[in-house]
Image: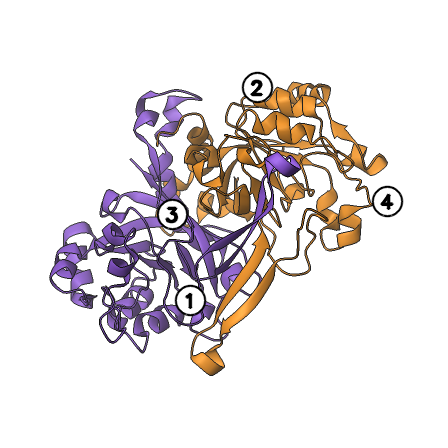
Chain colours: A purple, B orange
Amino acid sequence: MRLRAALPILALALASCRSAGSGGEGPLGARRVLDLTYSLNERGPYWPGGGYFPFTTEPLASIETHGVFSQSYRTPEHLGTHVDAPAHFEKGEWTIDRIPVERFFGPGVVIDMTERARADADATLGIDDVLAFEAAHGRVPEGAIVFLRTGWGRRWDDVAAYRNADASGAMHFPGYSAAAADFLARQRKVAALGIDTLSVDPGPSRDYGAHHAGNRQNVYFIENVARLEELPATGFGVIVAPIKIEGGSGGQARVFALLD
Amino acid sequence: MRLRAALPILALALASCRSAGSGGEGPLGARRVLDLTYSLNERGPYWPGGGYFPFTTEPLASIETHGVFSQSYRTPEHLGTHVDAPAHFEKGEWTIDRIPVERFFGPGVVIDMTERARADADATLGIDDVLAFEAAHGRVPEGAIVFLRTGWGRRWDDVAAYRNADASGAMHFPGYSAAAADFLARQRKVAALGIDTLSVDPGPSRDYGAHHAGNRQNVYFIENVARLEELPATGFGVIVAPIKIEGGSGGQARVFALLD
């Protein structure tokens, strides 16, 4: 599988490592991998409804009794830090096992809307916000893996605050507008859209416009991404590695940022 | 988290991408990512015994009925292409969520024993085999992710042939000797040992000597690795991305090779 736009950014992120030599410190000491993945457990927030349930492990063997420690687990595909495949909302698009691997490597972009989300939990990213970001940080590159930072990551350990449901059960958290998702998918040809909430659509959404707009263009999503507050706006590489479920609609992913 | 020996090899694998520029072909066109991961389904080989069962999905929602496609799944941690954490066999060592992330990036090494395994399904890799490999290809570098290629990958689609059990139920496939695993862990300080069979120990093993020898040194394992026959002996980078189960003994992993 050939790589085009994605790999140069990883190379840039890593290239000065060459001069350090094997095992050396120096310039290499400044390079970091950041794990943007939450650990999976029974306590973490998950989507309420749709038959969803918490991540659950069951023991198979213990070192004390069997000489080996082993478990099984059961989970919705869309729980924890996970990928939504294009087939999640669009019939005939890629299932999780069919996303071309070069789309898992890309330049990282973080668009921040923490301040707006603090004032309005239902705030949505518009096309104008993307253009304002580009005026400050440069054009979102083709093949980019874009993260929307809303500040919701601070709520991860408080399930009620993370879901932020009102008395009617409607959730309130920020997200991408359908227009911004469509713009990034079609005009910027991004590989993926990520966010630090339960969904790329804002909490109250009923039509899942951002999901449809992205999935329709074979853009995949990464939800419940951790540690976005530790990332710069640009200048880092991203690796997304989802579990390879045959015909799956999505699945748990390990997500790494490669930073200066 | 700082990276030391691991990243220079990835940088080498990717560095010429820099000259290609964004979106360019040319030297970049020659660079490839190889997905060393099998797709997870109900048919694939899994460990017989220990309460293990096939990978199973259950529908949660369909686009026809619910406007969205979503599933749950259930699986042993040690099924398909997966990582054994050091805690799998050694009490107090790292669970899958605690393996430092820099150990997931390393220079790749493939030691081939396909011919020996063809003649003897119980063949084991010895220290002398490692030294013979090094005489031909150079020293196994610190932080390496080592793969033992046995030819078993060709049997993946035939569960009985992959397990290769005899009338007594004992399986017969090649593996690492405990001595070689200990040598690679302690004398070469590798990050991980991988293989294209169900286990790093040979099929008939009852004492799991290779597992203990590696896990004791906090070396993790990658089992059921796909497409090893497409890899060179050295000169490529590896990324291992396991599902991050809190306190897990192992879990499904996405494994990528970065090649010239």
Question: Disc 2 and disc 1: Cα gap in Å?
Answer: 46 Å
- Looking at the picture, which amino acid does disc 4 mark? Asp
Q: Give residue A122's position: percent from left, percent from top.
A: 19, 68
The secondary structure type at the circle numbered 3 is: loop
What secondary structure is found at the residue carrying circle 1? loop
The label shown at residue B186 is 2
**Residue at figure coordinates x 35%, y 58% from the top left:** A45
Packing grade of label 1 (10 A; few <14, some 14-19, many >=20) is many
Q: How crowded is mark 4: few (under 14 residues within 10 Å), some or many (20 or more)?
A: few
Q: Mark 4 points at which residue?
A: B166
The residue pinned by badge 1 equals: A218
Contact (Cβ within 8 Å) of mark 2 with mark 1? no
Q: Give the chain letter at badge 1.
A: A
- Where A168 sits versus B185, above or below? below
Residue nearest the viewer, comparing B87 with A250: B87
- Do pointers 3 and 4 mark residues of a single chain? no
Q: Can residue B149 be seen in this view?
A: yes
Mark 3 and mark 1 on one chain: yes
For badge 3, the amino acid type reads: Thr
Mark 3 nearby-residue class (10 Å; few <14, some 14–19, many ≥20): many
User: Is the residue at mark 2 from the same chain as the one at mark 1?
Assistant: no
- Identify the residue under disc 3: A37
